Image (cartoon, grey):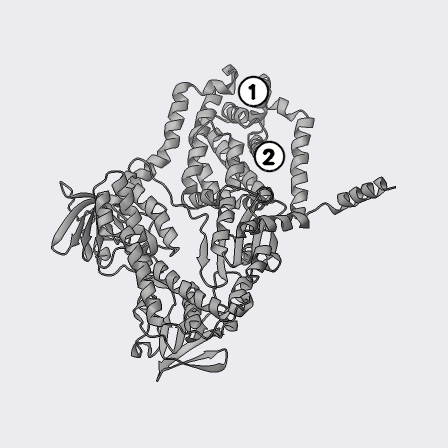
Amino acid sequence: MKRRLPLLLLLLSLVGLFFLLDGHHWLRLEVLREHLGALQAYQQAHPWSSILLACLLYVLVTALSIPGAAALTLLMGALFGLWHGVVIVSVSSTLGATLAFLMTRWLFRDAIQQRFAQQLATVNQGVERDGHWYLMFLRLVPAFPFFLVNWLMALTPIRWWTFLWVSQLSMLPGTFLYVNAGQQFASLDSVKGILSPSIAVALLAIALFPFVAKRMVAYVQSRKVLKGFHKPAQFDANVVVIGAGAAGLVSSMIAATVKATVVLVERDRMGGDCLNTGCVPSKALLASAKAAQRIRDARRFGMDVPAFAVDFPQVMSRVRTAIRTIEPHDSVERFTGMGVECAQGDARIVSPWEVAVGDRVIRTRKIVIASGARPAVPAIAGIDSVDYLTSDTVWSLQELPERLLVIGGGPIGCELAQAFARLGSHVTVVQRGPRLLPREDRDVAGVLQQQMQAEGIVIHTGFTADRIESGCLHGRVGAQSVQVGFTHVLVATGRAANTQGMGLESVGVVLAGNGTIAVNEYMQTRVPTIYACGDVAGPYQFTHMASHQAWYAMVNALFGGWKRFAVDYTLVPRVTYTEPEIASVGLAEEDAEAQQVPVDVTRYDFSGFDRAIAESCTEGFIKVLTAKGTDRVVGVTIAGAHAGELLGQFTLAIKHRIGLNQLLGTLQAYPTWAEAPRLLAGSWKRERAPQRLLSWVGRYHRWLLK
């Protein structure tokens, strides 16, 4: 801010000087009218210099946001006539507005964006997408002050060149109106007299034109995409949902709730990945692995447990029991009872309004694709020569792998690696990147890596895989050759969207660069009747995000003709269910550094937390990022026991702007894990205690003892 101070002082001085010299008096309509004759005489005697002076004055007034631009515009019409006046005012007002825009941006945008980053995220997305339309609307509606538009747009991501040309174009109708009125300058009593009700309505109609035009363009584009397809005269359903995973189930439930006719198509099992191969079985396996580890650690709790054995078939039987117990929640029977028609088979989109399932063709007004994703397999020479496992197929194991190689150090790889190691496998993890959990901060990934290595897991980061042959993975870490022997290989290198075999290309649905279906902010594909949500659409492949997107996709599909809702990605919590758990939401510390966002970082270690000490769970910490100089939470990362549950308080705090002072002032039961956020808030408060004031308070107390 220091380097911006000279410009700010200069601008304030110029504005102050203007008012000090009574400049605002000379820009009043009645004063200009009194001197109109003298000004016209000067203009006739010095036509070119009068144009230059008029331009300079207009640019100065608009750049400094000084009142009087409307009166000056009228004066231009009186002095130079309609066409010359329009050119002078149009060019000068655009230059002045752009200068005001640039100065405001340089002085204030970074500070405003950093302080209100969470609140402005949605606004920024809208401006980046449709900023020119918004600016045109604001310019054309007389109710929005000229200078205020300059200031507000300067605080957004809109490009200065876009601001310039849109301002130039959209101010022309108003400029023409005022300059034309200026030809009757001598008879005008006030600027307000120009805006009769009919003219105000006309300007409002012009202002609405960009949005009407945008809808017209969208309509023409949709007609172009739909050209060549025959729209049915009648329909069998309001919407067909393809895929019965988290996104598809929530979509169908919403449609049924609002009494729409919905057909849910699933080719495999209801519940999708989350129930059958993802969240449910993995958490059941992790629970068994955690129990095994607790038995090994029994001596820490004062117990001497004899040697025990893991019954792996029983562990896997328990996993399947967990799936069967939850299955009724996602069953055909439950959803049929809600009013959803469930169809079994492969869905193929044959037109923007038709979905084929076997021999049946369902005519539908809208289609929602929620087909999920599958494990991605890296291109490693020889990988097809081994019967590798994935997060989809690992649940078929009946014998514990003796030596398990895990390719990939992301959340899935780390969770399953630790689980199998605790159940008795010798586990090696190879990770191409420099650390585990690349989306998390370095210190958080370090805590997990240290714990996994302490449990006997071998970890190779910065690993380049060359080939697999004879039960061995050959690769390199830097210049050093590394060979990893195995009996089983688990591939955990991400997930790829399920887009094959549905006929997407034949109807014009396009894919994004990462293989997901390309959708707009309303979860709508290029084909206006087709929407997508969940893992198949990205960008976050979480079950809770799939459910989140499903609401937007279905509501927009059913009611988008009346009102559309843009999906909100401003706050996405995530949890990795290792031990220690890793949970985060909002801005990460490394991201804040990379984006040069000024934040204060407060860390609270569990080593001093009473409940953690009592349970021997002192590994880990909470790290909170607050906006510089405030208690407003902008990001949280937790590594340790119950991290996912503790994250909920902070997610709520960020969403509803609950500061650390309020967390500190909220009483929590002792000793509970829920107390940890409050204790962190206490650490934050102590670090900012007014030491000078406290020293004087100390002197006061010592004086009382005398």
- Location of residue 201 (image quadrant): top left
Foreground pick, 575 / 170 = 575
Name the residue at 51% across, 59% down: 641
Residue 427 horizontal/vertical position (percent): 43, 75
Few, some or many C-alpha atoms within 10 Å of disc 1 (few <14, some 14-19, many ≥20)? many
The number of numbered discs placed on residues in the rendered structure image is: 2
| x and y percentages locating residue 47 in the rendered image | 55, 30
Q: Is residue 278 left or right of residue 653?
A: left
Q: CA distance from mark 1 to mark 2?
A: 19 Å
Tell me residue 161's x, y (percent): 48, 45
Q: Is residue 488 left or right of residue 255?
A: right
Secondary structure of residue under mark 1: helix
Mark 1 = which residue?
29
Give x and y (percent) for residue 438.
Answer: 48, 64
Q: Taking the image as drawn, is residue 545 in sight?
A: yes
Indicate the secondary structure of the residue bearing disc 2. Answer: loop
Side of 543 where 613 appears, left or right: right
Query: Label 2 sits on what residue type?
Result: Leu
Whether residues under marks 1 and 2 lie with C-beta atoms below 8 angstroms apart, the answer is no
First of labels 1, 2 by sequence position:
1
